[in-house]
Image (spheres, rainbow, N blue to C red):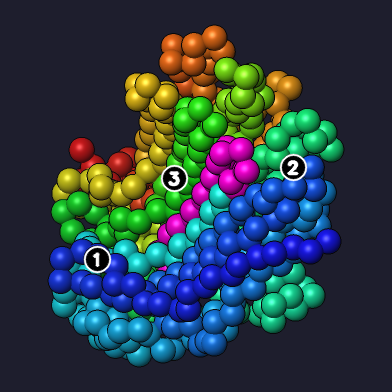
Amino acid sequence: MNLKSIITFSLATLSLIPLAPKMVMAQAVVSGASVHFIPDPISGNNFIQTISGSVSIPTGSFTGPTSIQPLVNSFSNINGSPTYDLLINPGGIDLTNPTSVTLNQQAADLLNASVGNISDVVSIIRANYNFLSNPSTAQAVATGSTTLSSPDGLIQSASAEYSLPIGLLFLGFDDGFNTGNCNGISGCIKITPFIDNLIAGDPSTPPVIQELTVDPGPVGLVNTPFDLATTAASILNGETNLSNIVSIIRAVSDANGVASPQVQARIAGAFTVRNQDGTTISTSGEIALPAGLYFATGDPGAGANVAFDCVQAGGLGCFSIIPELEQLAVGGLDFLNMTLLTINPGEVQPGDPSVGLNPGALNPASTDLNASAAFKIYENAGDINELSDLVSIIRAGAGTNSLTPESRPGARASGSSSIVLPNGATMSVNGEMTSSGSRYFQGGTPPSGSMIESLGYCNSSACLVIDPTITIETTDVNLSTIDELVIDPGIASTDAGWNFDAAAGYALSVAGTLQEQVSIIRAGGGLE
C-alpha cells in the first residue's frame, strides 16, 4: 500500500505569557503538526488527516534539537488504511536554564540559598508580599488536536488540553521502547487519534474519530526555584521546628489568611462535526480542580516524585476525549449527529491529606503555600499533646478576614453544545457547575449502553460526561433543535481539603475535648 503524506512542523518556540502586573515570564513551548493524505481503498479518493500538539514548561528550557515524527498507527484505520500518530520530541528539559530572569525568580534563588537561616528566610519572604499574593501563573500545558476530512465533504475535529497547577511539569512521553529517542525527562508528547468506521469493520458506515489521546508523560515536581511563593512552600513543607513553622506562616499571611496561588489543574476538550449539507454540531467541556490538586492515573505512593506513567497504566493515565456519534440520512446524504462527549482526565491526586500522606510525596504541600500551611495542621490534628502547636499554627495563618483567601480557585465543570444549520440559524446551550471550598467532582456516570460505559474508562476516572440531546429533523434539517444538555462531573468529594481553612475545620472536627475545641475556635477567630 502506498501512503502519501505531507509533513509540516514547527521547531521549539518561546511564547511570552502575560501574568500578574509587573511579572512577565517567558515559557519554553514546543509545538508540531503533520498533514497526511490517506487513500480510501473503497472510494479511491484520499482522506486528509491533520495532527498537531504542543507542550510547555513553567521554567527552564528545552535542550533541542526538536524532532517532529509522524508514527503509523496500525490499530487505527480508514477502511483498512492505517492512520497516523504524532510524536514531538524537544530533545530534553533543562530546568536550570530559564528562558528569562525575573525579579521573582532571583528572589526565589535568594530564598532557596537561605534555607537554614530562618531570619533571612522570613526577611526575604516579607520583602515583597506581591510575589505571594500574585505568584507566578506559569503553567505546564499539553495540547493535542486532530482533524479528519472525508472526500465527500464531511469534516471532524477533536482537541484536548491539560494545564497543571503551579510547580508541576510533564516529564515526557516514554513507552519504554525508546520510541523517537524519548526516554527519561525528555519533554516528549505523543498525540494519538483513534479512527475507525462508526461500526467497527463496517465500510457502509463512515470513518470517524472515536478517541483522541494526548500523552505528555508522568507528572513531576519542578525541582528548581523559579517563583518566590512556590519556593517558600517547599521550605515550609520541609520545616519541622515549630517556631520556624509559625514564623514562616505569619510571613506568608495577611488579612486574607495564608497566600494562595491562583492557577489550577484544568482539562478541556471539544469535538466538532461539519456535515455535507453544512450543518455543524459542536460539543465541548472543561473540568478544573481546586488549587493544588491534579489529574493522573495510579497511586503516587509515599515519597514518590512521579505520579503516573501513561504506558504502564495502559494508556488511561493520559488525558483523552471520546466523542460518540450516530449516523442518519438527511436529504439523501450521510449525516453524523453527536450524542455524547466524554473527557477522561484520569484520577484526582494526591488524595486525602488527613490520612497520613507523606509530606515528601508529590502533593500540593510541595508547591502551594496555602496547602503547605494546611498540611502542618493535619500533622498535629487530633492529638491533645500537640494542641499548643496546633493552636500556634492556626493563629499564625488566621487573617482578620478569613483563614483561606476567598479568591482561592475551586472546582468547576462546564459544558456546551451548539448547532449551526444550513440556513444560518444557530442554537447553543451551555452550563457550569462549581463546588465550594476544597471539594472536587469525583467523576460522572456515562449513560447506559454508551460506548464509554462499555469501555469502562470512567470506573476509576474523574470523567466529565457531556450528554446533549439534539433532534435532527431529517425531512427539514433547518428545524433541528438542541432539546437538552446534561453535564455530569459526578458528586462532590468528601475528602479533607488541601487548604488552610479546611484543615482548621478538620482539626476542630476531630478535637476530642471541649478544651481542644475552644482553643481551636479561638485560634481561628479571624474567620468570618
**Judging from the image, what secondary structure is the residue with disc 2 in?**
loop
Give the vertical position of 5 relative to 390 (above or below): below
Whether 153 is among the magenta residues is yes
Q: Which residue is mark 3?
A: 288
Give the vertical position of 404 relative to 139 (above or below): above
In space, the residues marked 1 and 2 are separated at their CA atoms by 49 Å
> Measured from the top left, where is residue 351 in percent x and y?
57, 50
Quadrant where the N terminus is found in the figure:
bottom right
Residue 205 falls in image quadrant: top right
Image mark for residue 192: none
**N-terminal-most mark, 3 or 1:** 1
Q: Which residue is mark 2?
A: 43
Q: Residue at x 45, y 41 (%)?
A: 286
Q: Which residue is mark 1?
A: 18
Q: Residue at x 29, y 67 (%)?
A: 17
Q: What's under tag 1, amino acid-wise?
A: Pro
Q: What's under tag 3, amino acid-wise?
A: Ala
Res. 62 in view: yes
What span is in magenta? Answer: 148-171
**Judging from the image, what secondary structure is the residue with disc 3 in?**
strand
